[in-house]
Image (spheres, rainbow, N blue to C red):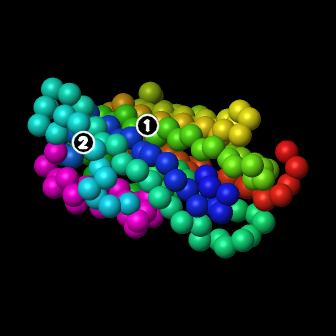
Amino acid sequence: MQPDGSLQGKTHWEWSGYAAAEARTTEPAQLVRTLQQQLGDDTTPISAAVWQHQREPAHSLQLDLPLQMDNTEGQATTTYLALLARLGLNSNPFSAESRYFPVDFGTTRDETHQLTLTLPDGVTLTEKPQSQSLALPDNGGRFTYLCAQEGRTVQFMSRLQLNKAQYSAAEYANLREFYARIVAKHAEPLVLSTGARP
């Protein structure tokens, strides 16, 4: 994080298994644009992307991408920063209250987002989200969220594990609530103050 409230850094993305196969079928520039739109970065050129293992399906597909996000809150003394709302789930894909057919993901899932934010001098973390762990019944899945501060560094980790490729209609209500709580957790912001004492 820069003193003016903008964010500069780098992102590292990895896809493996079925996710890597799907990502490899997407035109690389289009995938980079999609990620930049998700992050709110309209400054970094697509040519700055560095790929690894694009044509090596035995390895995970990797992308290193610089990040530039402008400050949209001006000179406010308090800033609310919900970074995982950009990186992770920001809407519940299960909007219907009930379902009569199974939910078929096609495969199990294991998605992890890790984030490190370094605060500049003069910016103090006054409130952060609480760590949380959620689980679906019968070992159907787990969500783990960690947020910790050490000095001027704030670290996040969000991991979503879906242990089944298919969930029955009877499991739908629990799955829907599970996702709703993940979206709510990702929306919880860091509260940063300018000029406050640590």
Image quadrant holding the C terminus, namely top right
Please indicate, yes or no, whether residue 13 appears anywhere in the rendered image: yes
User: Residue 38's quadrant in the figure?
Assistant: bottom left
In depth, the one of 147 and 142 nearer the eye is 147
Return the x and y of residue 127 as percentages of the image width and height. Answer: 76, 49
Q: Amino acid at mark 2?
A: Trp
Pointer 2 residue: 51
Q: Is residue 104 left or right of residue 35?
A: left
Q: Is residue 24 left or right of residue 79?
A: left
The main secondary structure of the magenta stretch is: helix
Q: Amino acid at mark 1?
A: Thr
The residue drawn where x is 62% and y is 55% is: 2
Q: Is residue 104 left or right of residue 37?
A: left
- Secondary structure beneath dot 2 equals strand
Return the x and y of residue 50 as percentages of the image width and height. Answer: 28, 44
In depth, the one of 125 and 172 nearer the eye is 125
Please indicate, yes or no, whether residue 98 appears anywhere in the rendered image: no
Return the x and y of residue 144 as percentages of the image width and height. Answer: 54, 34
Pointer 1 residue: 112
The residue drawn where x is 23% and y is 36% is: 52
Q: Residues within 10 Å of mark 1 (few under 14, many from 20)?
A: some
Q: Residue farthest to the right?
A: 197
Magenta segment boundaries in residue numbering: 24-43
The residue drawn where x is 16% and y is 39% is: 54
Q: Is residue 147 left or right of residue 122?
A: left
39 in magenta: yes
